[in-house]
Amino acid sequence: MPSYDSSRGRLRLADRHIGVFAHLLDGETPPDELWPSLVELQQIGLVGEEGELAPLMRDLLGALAEPMVMITVEVTGEHGPVNHGVIVGQNAVISHDGWPGEEESEYVPLEPSTLVWELARKVNLRSGESEEPAVDRIETTMGALDAAFVALGEGDGVDEEATNDLVRKALVEADSNLKDLELTQFAKLVLAINSTWRITTAWDGKHDDERAAMVRALAVWDCGNRGYWIREKPEEPILPGQVTPESVLVLVKSNAGELWEKVADLLPDKADLIDEA
């Protein structure tokens, strides 16, 4: 059920509610499958009887109607994937956060100057000590990673040493090119993963003086006390069907400070954006 907090401009909305707003903004009547969602929005006063929109919706809908930059944040942890993001509009910046198992996301207005902080919060980027790895770069295949995850699922979740042995055995069978130090380090990382996350920014820009969709992305493994590892390959952005078991997987050790800079570098400068004025 949608809801809102007028004191802070917060909204809780599902994608189906956003779909209703999209139709209303275009002057269209929402289709039958969205009618229950429209009724929910009318019940809490965000949509009037004639389809008029509440003033509280102005910033969010303005940003959705004419986004300058779209930022998606995909975080996969113990409870599966959760989607967050930021919409940068002409007159407002709106952040939204998902929650595991929940249909609705929370939409809140954001000060542009805090955008990097907000993205760091969404992926739980934090400073702190981590172990010094035996190797700071690992190269293998996506097939080996899949085999490691299968072996991890076969472990009992209690005996870490036995699970580590299962993962090592799976990696040896899947990729005979893994050297001993890489093999040992990779197995440790698989067992230590807290989450994996990916931030993608997209906007209308120019390439070779032609208008084009511009995309930047960063993919990272958060391995707890074993530190942060950037997934350099497969290189983002990844298209559907592009990754196969034979695709090369490259992980490179990083840290919170470096990742902060890389997150900031994902954002386009004003000169990168097309001026619609």
Image (cartoon, rainbow, N blue to C red):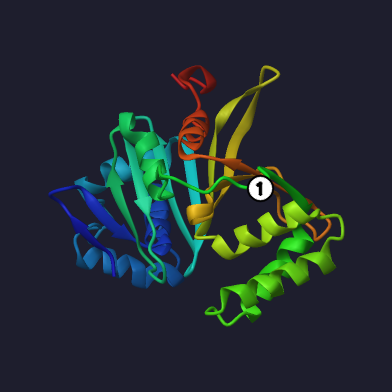
Q: Measured along the vertical axis of the image, is residue 44 above or below residue 25?
A: below
Q: Is residue 50 left or right of residue 117?
A: left
Image side of residue 29 versus residue 72, left or right: left
Question: Nearest the camera: 130 or 101?
Answer: 130
Instruction: Name the one closer to the observer, 45 or 167.
Output: 167
Q: Position of residue 96 (x, y in %)?
A: 36, 50
Disc 1 target residue: 134
Residue 12 higher or lower than 139, as above or below: below
- Left or right, 6 with reference to 181: left
Q: Is residue 168 left or right of residue 72?
A: right
Can residue 233 be seen here? The reply is: no
Q: Residue at x 42, y 52 (%)?
A: 22
Three-letter residue code for mark 1 = Ala
Q: Quadrant of the N terminus?
A: bottom left
Task: Please state the horizontal and vertical placement of residue 17, each as a whole percent of the image.
Answer: 37, 61
Query: Residue lying farthest left?
Result: 7
In the picture, the quarter occupied by the C terminus is top left
